[in-house]
């Protein structure tokens, strides 16, 4: 009899408590995908319960409870101005749409895509083409999180974390709800070795 194989995963029922609309099969898949990304790109102090609660709750809001891997494009007034955002590394009209939000944290802009591509071992063009792919959604989020919070988020408030993630406080009330749910069972949001 061969020994049981283990892989890292989060508590999938805890993901459903944070995001009540998640069906069982999706929650189980996410539990593995998010854990793999979190193990590959841990924050400087490692994944604590507080850090994981912030990460999962912000991803839940940015992705519409893990439904969207790419930013919904209108374009809205703000989206029409993306290409002029030098702080995002954009300068051509095509950059706004091409480098629109991607992954569960909605990584946005050519500069962020370029940094993510390097961390993921892809070219900028490859990442721009594959940013919709499910395999990169959690990885994009985790690599961005580690870079954006070099000292971690454990002692930060939801407002402080939201300001970094969003650039403002868009959806703050909903983010607080997700964070409150995540905090109640945060120990199950830290990647653990479990049987498949």
Image (cartoon, grey):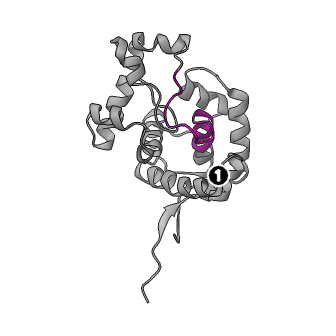
Q: Which residue is mark 1?
A: 15
Residue 196's spot in the image, x, y percent? 51, 69
Q: Residue at x 50, y 55 (%)?
A: 35
The residue lying furthest to the bottom in this view is: 1
Image height of 42 relative to 172, above or below: below
Q: Residue at x 34, y 34 (%)?
A: 129
Image quadrant holding the N terminus, namely: bottom left
The residue lying furthest to the front in this view is: 74
Horizontal relation, residue 183 to residue 165: left or right? right
Residue 46's spot in the image, x, y percent? 49, 51
Residue toward you, 31 or 163: 31
The residue lying furthest to the left in this view is: 123
Can residue 95 be seen in this snapshot?
Answer: yes
Q: Which residues are magenta?
A: 54-73
Can residue 90 be seen in this snapshot?
Answer: no
Horizontal relation, residue 189 to residue 179: left or right? left
Q: Residues within 10 Å of mark 1 (few under 14, many from 20)?
A: many
């Amino acid at each position: 009899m061969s020994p049981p194989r283990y892989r890292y995963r989060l508590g999938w029922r805890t993901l459903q408590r944070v995001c009540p609309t998640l069906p069982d099969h999706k929650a189980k898949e996410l539990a593995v995908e998010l854990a793999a990304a979190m193990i590959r790109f841990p924050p400087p102090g490692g994944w604590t319960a507080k850090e994981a609660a912030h990460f999962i709750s912000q991803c839940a809001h940015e992705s519409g409870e893990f439904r969207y891997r790419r930013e919904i494009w209108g374009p809205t007034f703000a989206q029409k101005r993306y290409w002029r955002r030098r702080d995002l590394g954009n300068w051509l009209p095509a950059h706004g749409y091409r480098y629109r939000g991607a992954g569960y944290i909605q990584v946005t802009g050519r500069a962020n895509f370029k940094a993510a591509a390097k961390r993921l071992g892809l070219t900028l063009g490859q990442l721009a083409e594959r940013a919709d792919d499910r395999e990169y959604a959690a990885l994009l989020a985790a690599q961005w999180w580690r870079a954006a919070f070099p000292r971690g988020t454990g002692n930060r408030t939801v407002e402080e974390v939201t300001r970094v993630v969003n650039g403002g406080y868009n959806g703050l009330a909903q983010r607080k709800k997700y964070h409150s749910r995540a905090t109640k069972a945060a120990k199950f949001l830290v990647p653990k070795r479990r049987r498949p």
